[in-house]
Amino acid sequence: MLPREIVTEHDPEWSRFDLPPRQLGPLRFIGLVPMLFAVGFAWMPGKQLVHSVTEIIAGSGSGFNWFLVVFLSVFVVAALMPFGFGLFLFAGRTRVVVKKDRIVTTEIAGPFRWSRRWKFAEMDHLEISGATLADGQAQGFIGALCGVTVILKNGRKTPVVAGYPRAWLQPLVAEITSLMQRRGKAVPVEEISALPDREDKTITTEQRAEKPAGSAIELSSTDWSAEFTVPSRGLFKESCGLVGFGAVWCIFVGVIGWFVFGKEGLNEGAIFLLLFFAIGFVMLLTGIHLGTRRWTLRANHAQLHVTLKSALRSREWKWAAGEIADIRVGDSGTKVNERMLEQLQVMTHQGKSKTGLLTGRTHDELAWVATTLRGALGAPAGESPEAPPRIDRSNRHG
């Protein structure tokens, strides 16, 4: 049975479920952060946009004023996205409508509306996830951190409802699936009480003693140590195109600034363009750093020493052999073109913390590096690091 807080309305063509504003307690004030950011982001372009529109209306505007209106409108419209997100979090509610062949959910916050639609034929199953309260535990705002996600047949996941108690969502999903079944589409429901253990699913410890074909990584090994030299794969490939994007951004903004404000000197509009030029320049510098990275990894029975050098900075990590629980291959948490990038992960005994290295290298390269490093760290002095065993120092820390 649906809770009384959810207002329902049924029609032969559709059924509508209106949920109340989210009861997130102090968490809802987090929504003010993207709202304030959006206001600051749009303030200068919005002011210049109003000035250009005023000149056009007064009849004194030129073709360039029309260009500025179009150009600056992009930034103002872009600012509406974080502002709307913050507003939905701060004072939003959700409406779910089940029609003959699809589900429509709408986020509502004052005049702002944002709708998403899924056809029944595209849906694989629904998933309820979030906090689960123990018997007798008070609801509180933490208990409202639950949501419903639709998993499509192509594997894509999209939230349907978020920020409501599980006790509300369970009967709501039951009602939705019942309506769908009457319309000829049965969709299973999966409940997740806790987040899955990513470490067990995404991190692998495997043996690979041979260098992958075509790899540019060089290995220098002796009977007591191993040293890897990992060159850059290229400026653009290593930076995932960030160098090119940042360069085009800077050129584009620089050309506009030269033609518009070259003669007028600094004013509010010029300061606005300088801000955006700085954003592009930071992206360019970040791309240069990523694109020129060179790694060196040295391991022996006593320690693991890793250095990272680029055209802009250098960094190093050191671990004593006894600190390291394992060296594995795992997901970095970063996706590029819908592909999850893998990385080398150094796992330590202290707090089971991990450090990610060599993000973006191929799986075979990472497995080879991890296998060789484990052997160099785990083998006693005088033994070869080739074909190494997995590190296991549980007795030392027992």
Image: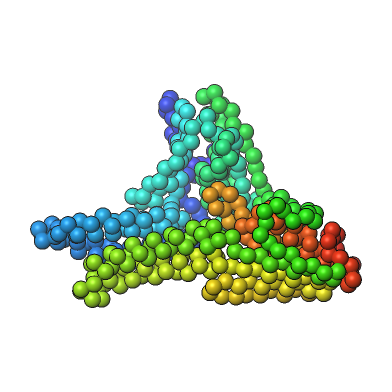
Does any portion of residue 393 appear in the rendered image?
A: no
> In the rendering, at what x and y percent does residue 324 appear?
78, 68
> In the rendering, at what x and y percent does residue 302 appear?
82, 74
Does any portion of residue 221 appear in the rendered image?
A: yes
> In the rendering, at what x and y percent does residue 384 appear?
86, 65
Specify how the rendered protein is coloured: rainbow
- The reply, left or right, for residue 23 in relation to residue 108 is right
* Residue that extends furthest to the left in the rendered view of this protein: 59
In the image, 268 versus 142, the foreground residue is 268
**Does residue 191 lie above or below 243 as drawn?**
above
Res. 386 image quadrant: bottom right
- Residue at figure coordinates x 60%, y 51% from the top left: 340
Res. 311 image quadrant: bottom right
- The reply, left or right, for residue 26 in relation to residue 190 is left
- Residue at figure coordinates x 63%, y 71% from the top left: 308
- The reply, left or right, for residue 243 in relation to residue 69 is right
